[in-house]
């Protein structure tokens, strides 16, 4: 243990230098991995803010993240959602930069982006930006924390944004069950709080204090009061990554962040009291879900785990409980046909307490036997308690953590900054800030590590845990809960019931393990032993892979790593077959086959995944993928086993039924997801030549037999075209060896390269199509719009570049106008959309909203009309800034091997082989001018264009939207009240109810309160209140007016007939003949 004097001696104080306030530097080197070429420094400002500055000499993107040690558990009791609301409103302008979208606009022009999130004990704000723009971006960012405006004009709009975000999540089981677990907390504990908040929770206090001022003013006043109390420099941890030197970054941080006030608060407030009390432990909670799935989650209370950073005992236990190899709990339950997945591990719920969780997704048969599953889990925990763990288990975990740390791939700077700013609060020696969260130490000789494990393990008993059983209502009824009494969680309306386990079940669960199928895993045979990397100095990295082998059956592309120098490789093998997606039934058979292969490989591949070597096998529209990624030492062993299983899979009837059930469930649940994903899905379907809807595929699933799968797989694999990419720490002969091994194992006949290609459907010129569909979930309040305008040939370099610049220009205003100002909904974005086959592209705008999609389309078109003048009047300086932003985006280098491989594969998979496309884009961009962009906008995007091609998909919610009271209706009601003799201040209702138009219910409640205060005669008030519905009908709000058909639009009645009327895109062809191989091919 260090003394206070020693700790103080680790810091070097720098005095004020001109405009740079004083700060302290941590004098010791920060421990980092051998592959990390960045330089680190930790500094401490006079106001208590701690910062880690990182000099990355190769960076082309800078980033920063500031973590505040306050989250929603610190909300005022009477204003749930305050921390989240603060996170929203903080971005809306500062004293230095008062324009509310100035920050986002600046980032957009400099290849940047930003976001934030509110958690239980912290709130994190972050951004990324092109490296030359770090200082001005950081200046804007820092101002949010010392001089935010919390503009009154934005208060109501951001209340709407928070409310819209809550409604977006309202039908999501993850959010519903999370809040239910919080609700079922001992009385008075802050864990019970409703963290995301909504308009009602944030306005209620203001409504109750209406005598003191308008709701909006009171809400803002409370926000500023809360921010002034809770946001403190001493509670802030900052991480900044840039190309500047450590001295420059340190000075910049001190200059910009020293103005933040230190209010003398506890820098890391803790809640050491666990939310589980005696009433919460030893219970079974049954919960009704929206989606169709069966799951059981067993949770045990944990103390704060960060102080146990050295041995990480919960990770040790999770290694066993979550294992999927022979002898594991997962293996036992899977062989019973009861489960589809099992995960375990610790979850830090807040600073001060956590949970150890075992989450099991069950089959239908498993759900019927959930008690046996729970019992088996406790028997496995009993097995662990009775076991003596040889030291090699921890040594193996420690060795793997060290290997993964030393050879960790570089992450995107904003992701890394967010991770590190959150880790800085850990109670570890400062020099271990980076390494301690990633490393696990071997147990010491004194037995402290094993003691930590056993202390936690002794608490994992049925009387100290809680079991949550998740399924739809009808499934609960089938297992005997038909006449049960259900309660309702207040914020999401989730039905649930709580009961205690019967005594005989508790006795069984506390007993010794008597299942011989359960035993501890053996040593991991996939741990890499050869981690050598042949590092050669290169003057310039090679920018593309080379074709090293071409036969009638396959093409093999290869690139030896020349920049990351890690003992890792990535291999992608694509098996193309026209039979894979020839019909809805064929698509189903291919998907089931791929899932069965994965199912059969679970036990074998699990150790490989633990050792940093993973594989993927999946179906897609052109056939099958095999991907391998990780340490190259034993990659060939895994590849051989996977390919052999693909070729020789013996389908088991019991596993087929499990896989079919899972696919039916997944596809059915898709329709209960976010509506904008559905509108995108249907939009994509309209524009893809060979695609089958889930509605077409679902009926095929139950009819599939073992023989069907065996026959389909044999026929599909009998003739293939194979495309392969090998990149990383592998030699050319090893890559060729993988290819020949794969061909030998699969042994297919060759298929011509052009037999199986993706093709898009192209909307005709001068077209305006709308496809309207109902939202499948009847309780989903959100509609969605996917609005697409076709631009054209993506292989036309000039058209591609101008289209990309147009999207760059439109993206930030689309968000600012449609989301921030018009408050259409929480999900709003504008992007390019590359069509299947990558030959064509267009521009798409997506909005998810409670408003109807016809109204949304009208607002999108109004926005596009306004952009005509916006582009036309754009200053030359602003236009150049937009070009520079796009230039920086295209100049951005890949950060790791996976990114590099994905970039190459996109060109191989498309068939165009245009590996130098980004260089071409940059050259073309130099000559693009504003007139080029305006011309493209007016011909292809502008609603006034006589030649543009446009398709929109309207997903319309079936849930009736609460009627709103328009300003005209409210004024008319006020007039009626005055005519009835009620003395009123004109327009007082607007001040009280804020900018948001009230619902008829809220409007009626407000006036009922007014009449009570004014002691209006009951008969008069009742008569007046009864007239509200008629006035709402007489003076409807614009959005409530029954929307007719869009003028000039052609509505799609038959999607298949519509698709058959469209022309298809061109077949792909190489745009460059690279000439890597001699003319005589082998």
Image (tube, grey):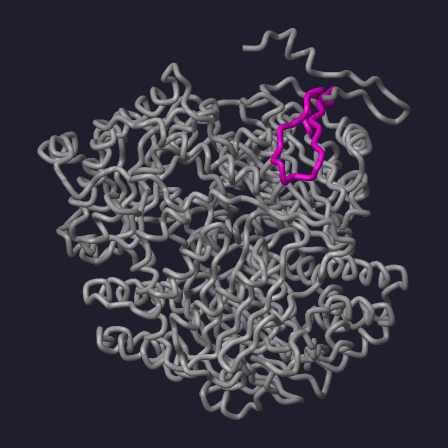
Out of 530 and 918, give the one closest to the viewer: 530
Q: Give the residue displayed 37% in from the left and 83% down from the top.
A: 583
Q: Front-most of 885 and 32?
A: 32
**Residue 975 is at least partly visible in this image:** no
- Residue 394: name its quadrant: top left
Tell me residue 509's x, y (percent).
16, 34
Residue 575 picture location, percent across and down:
45, 74
Quadrant showing the C terminus = bottom right
- Point 44% across, 75% down: residue: 623
Q: Quadrant of residue 973?
A: bottom right
Residue 976 coordinates in the image, percent (x, y): 55, 58
> Which secondary structure class fits the magenta region best?
loop
Establish if 103 lies above or below 866. above
Q: Quadrant of residue 870?
A: bottom right
Q: Going 34% across and 77% down the picture, which residue do you hit?
A: 697
The residue under the point 56% across, 71% down is 556
Q: Position of residue 361 (x, y in %)?
A: 29, 51
Residue 582 versus residue 54 in the image, above or below: below
Q: Quick check: can you spot residue 609?
A: yes
Which quarter of the figure is the N terminus placed in?
Answer: top right
57 with respect to 480 (left or right): right
Say if the magenta span includes residue 809. Answer: no
Q: Is residue 53 left or right of residue 70?
A: right
Outermost residue toward the bottom in this view: 1061
Above or below residue 355? Residue 109 is below
The residue segment tinted magenta is 26-51
Is 41 colored magenta in this rendering?
A: yes
Q: Is residue 357 left or right of residue 786?
A: left
């Amino acid at each position: 243990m260090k003394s206070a004097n020693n700790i103080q001696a680790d810091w070097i104080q720098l005095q004020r230098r001109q405009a740079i306030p004083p700060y302290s530097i941590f004098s010791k080197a920060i421990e980092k991995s051998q592959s990390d070429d960045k330089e680190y420094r930790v500094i401490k400002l006079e106001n208590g803010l701690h910062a880690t500055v990182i000099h990355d000499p190769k960076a082309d993107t800078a980033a920063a993240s500031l973590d505040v040690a306050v989250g929603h558990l610190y909300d005022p009791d009477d204003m749930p959602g305050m921390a989240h609301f603060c996170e929203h409103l903080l971005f809306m302008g500062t004293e230095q930069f008062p324009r509310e979208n100035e920050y986002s606009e600046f980032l957009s022009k400099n290849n940047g982006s930003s976001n934030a999130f509110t958690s239980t004990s912290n709130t994190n704000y972050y951004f990324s930006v092109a490296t030359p723009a770090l200082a001005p971006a950081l200046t804007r960012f820092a101002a949010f924390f010392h001089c935010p405006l919390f503009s009154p004009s934005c208060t109501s709009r951001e209340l709407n944004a928070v409310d819209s975000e809550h409604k977006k999540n309202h039908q999501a089981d993850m959010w519903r069950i999370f809040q239910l677990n919080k609700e079922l907390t001992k009385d008075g504990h802050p864990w019970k709080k409703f963290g995301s908040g909504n308009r009602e929770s944030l306005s209620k206090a203001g409504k109750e204090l209406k005598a003191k001022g308008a709701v909006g003013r009171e809400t803002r006043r409370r926000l500023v009061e809360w921010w002034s109390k809770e946001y403190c420099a001493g509670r802030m941890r900052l991480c900044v990554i840039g190309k500047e030197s450590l001295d420059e970054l340190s000075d910049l941080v001190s200059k910009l962040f020293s103005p933040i006030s230190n209010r003398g608060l506890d820098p890391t407030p803790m809640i050491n009291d666990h939310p589980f009390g005696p009433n919460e432990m030893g219970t079974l909670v049954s919960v009704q879900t929206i989606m169709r799935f069966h799951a059981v989650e067993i949770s045990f209370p944990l103390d704060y785990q960060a102080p146990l950073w050295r041995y990480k005992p919960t990770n040790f236990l999770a290694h066993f409980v979550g294992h999927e190899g022979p002898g594991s709990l997962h293996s036992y339950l899977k062989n019973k046909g009861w489960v589809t997945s099992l995960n375990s591990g610790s979850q830090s719920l807040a600073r001060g307490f956590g949970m150890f969780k075992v989450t099991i997704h069950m089959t239908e048969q498993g759900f019927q036997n959930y008690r046996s599953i729970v019992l088996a889990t406790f028997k496995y925990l009993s097995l662990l308690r009775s076991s003596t763990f040889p030291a090699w288990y921890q040594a193996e975990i420690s060795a793997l953590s060290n290997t993964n740390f030393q050879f960790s791939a570089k992450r995107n700077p904003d992701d890394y900054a967010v991770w590190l700013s959150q880790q800085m609060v850990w109670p570890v020696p400062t020099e271990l800030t980076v390494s301690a969260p990633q490393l696990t130490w071997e147990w010491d000789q004194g037995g402290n590590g094993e003691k930590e494990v056993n202390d936690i393990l002794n608490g994992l008993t049925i009387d100290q845990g809680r079991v949550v059983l998740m399924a739809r209502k009808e499934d609960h009824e089938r297992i005997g809960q038909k006449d049960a009494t259900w309660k309702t969680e207040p914020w999401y309306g989730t039905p649930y019931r709580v009961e205690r386990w019967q005594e005989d079940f508790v006795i069984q669960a506390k007993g010794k393990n008597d299942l011989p199928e359960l035993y501890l895993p053996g040593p991991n045979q996939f741990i890499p032993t050869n981690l050598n990397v042949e590092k050669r100095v290169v003057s310039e990295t090679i920018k593309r892979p080379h074709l090293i082998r071409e036969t009638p059956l396959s093409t093999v592309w290869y690139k030896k790593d020349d920049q990351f120098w890690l003992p890792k490789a990535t291999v992608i093998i694509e098996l193309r077959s026209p039979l894979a997606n020839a019909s809805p039934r064929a698509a189903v058979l291919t998907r089931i086959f791929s899932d069965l292969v994965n199912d059969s490989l679970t036990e074998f591949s699990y150790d490989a995944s633990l050792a940093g070597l993973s594989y993927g096998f999946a179906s897609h529209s052109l056939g099958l993928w095999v991907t391998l990624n990780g340490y190259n030492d034993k990659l060939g062993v895994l590849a051989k086993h996977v390919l052999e299983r693909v070729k020789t899979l013996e389908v088991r009837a019991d596993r087929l039924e499990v896989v079919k059930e899972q696919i039916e469930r997944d596809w059915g649940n898709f329709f209960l997801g976010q509506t904008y994903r559905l509108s995108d899905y249907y939009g994509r379907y309209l524009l893809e030549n060979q695609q089958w809807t889930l509605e077409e595929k679902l009926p095929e699933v139950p009819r599939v037999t073992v023989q069907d799968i065996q026959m389909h797989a044999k026929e599909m694999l009998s003739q293939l075209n194979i495309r392969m990419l090998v990149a990383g720490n592998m030699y050319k002969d090893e890559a060729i060896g993988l290819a020949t091994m794969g061909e030998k194992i699969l042994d297919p006949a060759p298929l011509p390269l052009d037999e199986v290609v993706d093709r898009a459907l192209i909307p005709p010129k001068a077209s305006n199509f709308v496809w309207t569909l109902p939202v499948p979930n009847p309780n989903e309040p959100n509609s969605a719009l996917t609005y697409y305008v076709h631009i054209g040939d993506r292989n036309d370099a000039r058209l591609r570049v101008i289209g990309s610049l147009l999207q760059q220009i439109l993206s930030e205003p689309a968000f600012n106008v449609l989301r921030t100002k018009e408050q259409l909904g929480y999900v709003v974005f504008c992007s390019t959309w590359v069509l299947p086959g990558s030959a064509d592209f267009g521009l798409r705008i997506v909005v998810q909203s409670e408003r109807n999609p016809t109204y949304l389309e009208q607002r999108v078109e109004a926005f596009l009309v306004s952009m005509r003048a916006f582009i036309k009047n754009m200053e030359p300086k602003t236009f150049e800034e937009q070009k520079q932003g796009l230039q920086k985006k295209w100049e951005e280098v890949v950060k790791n091997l996976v990114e590099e491989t994905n970039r190459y594969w996109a060109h191989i998979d498309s068939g165009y082989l245009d590996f130098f496309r980004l260089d071409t884009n940059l050259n073309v961009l130099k000559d693009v001018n504003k007139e080029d962009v305006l011309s493209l906008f007016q011909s292809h995007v502008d609603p006034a264009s006589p030649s543009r091609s446009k398709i929109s998909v309207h997903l319309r919610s079936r849930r009736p939207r609460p009627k709103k009271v328009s300003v005209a209706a409210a004024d008319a009601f006020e007039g009626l009240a005055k005519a009835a003799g009620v003395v009123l201040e004109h327009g007082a209702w607007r001040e009280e109810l804020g900018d948001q138009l009230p619902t008829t219910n809220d409007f009626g409640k407000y006036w009922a309160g007014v009449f009570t205060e004014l002691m209006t005669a009951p008969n008069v008030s009742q008569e007046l209140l009864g007239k509200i519905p008629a006035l709402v009908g007489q003076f409807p709000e614009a959005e409530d007016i029954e929307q007719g058909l869009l003028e000039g639009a052609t509505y799609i009645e038959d999607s298949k007939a519509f698709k058959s009327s469209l022309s298809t895109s061109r077949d792909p062809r190489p745009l460059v003949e690279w000439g890597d191989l001699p003319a005589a091919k082998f």
